[in-house]
Image (tube, rainbow, N blue to C red):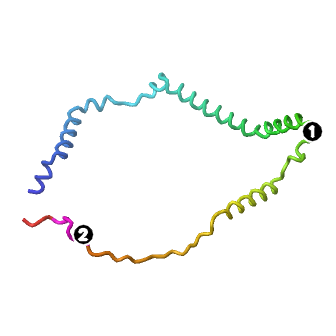
């Protein structure tokens, strides 16, 4: 009896009808095939090549920007020094800072900004709060079982 109820459900009827229609229209499934010549004739290869070229050119452009940014910054320094009437002395000028000096400065700034925080107390207090019994939140009144007839 339970088996017949499951068989007659709407979901299974829909699945059965779908499979029956698919078997009746089997010639439609046989007409679907993969044709590689359609890719060559169509715009697929052209679009792929254009996409690859765009990505490659963007990467080359980014490489050129990142590799020449130091030269651009040096040009700006030379321009400012020329406006003041001073001469630019190259890499070992008074404006060049070594990596160790940069690391020391950044570490000092990090430590300084970390000290700006207030020292918080990390003592946690957990208080047990007793609540009066309330049947509104009781789990025993939930309808998890079928009611008796």
Region in magenta: 134-145
Residue at which label 1 appears: 86
- Residue occupying image coordinates x 79% and y 40%: 70
On residue 139, which mark appears? 2
Q: Nearer the viewer, residue 138 or 127?
A: 127
Q: Quadrant of residue 23?
A: top left
For mark 2, give the secondary structure: helix
Q: How many marks?
A: 2
* In this rendering, position of residue 39 left or right of residue 89: left
Q: Position of residue 66 (x, y in %)?
A: 72, 39
Q: Nearer the viewer, residue 23 or 99?
A: 99
- Residue occupying image coordinates x 61% and y 34%: 55
Residue 78: in magenta span? no
Task: Tell which circle, 1 or 2, labels the residue nearer the N-terminal end.
Answer: 1
Q: Position of residue 135 (x, y in %)?
A: 23, 71
- Residue occupying image coordinates x 12% and y 48%: 8
Q: Nearer the viewer, residue 11 or 130?
A: 130
Quick check: 76 above or below 96?
A: above
Q: Position of residue 47 (x, y in %)?
A: 53, 27
Quadrant that contains the C terminus:
bottom left
């Amino acid at each position: 009896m339970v088996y017949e109820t499951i068989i007659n459900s709407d979901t299974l009827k829909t699945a059965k009808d779908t499979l029956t229609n698919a078997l009746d229209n089997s010639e439609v499934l046989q007409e679907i095939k993969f044709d590689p010549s359609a890719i060559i004739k169509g715009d697929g290869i052209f679009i792929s090549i254009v996409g690859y070229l765009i990505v490659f050119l963007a990467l080359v452009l980014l490489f050129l920007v990142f590799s020449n940014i130091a030269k651009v910054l040096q040009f700006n320094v030379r321009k400012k020094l020329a406006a003041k009437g001073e001469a630019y002395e190259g890499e070992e000028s008074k404006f060049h800072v070594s990596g160790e000096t940069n690391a020391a400065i950044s570490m000092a700034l990090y430590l300084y900004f970390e000290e700006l925080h207030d020292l918080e107390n990390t003592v946690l207090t957990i208080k047990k709060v007793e609540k009066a019994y309330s049947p509104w939140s009781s789990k025993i009144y939930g309808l998890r079982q079928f009611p008796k007839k």
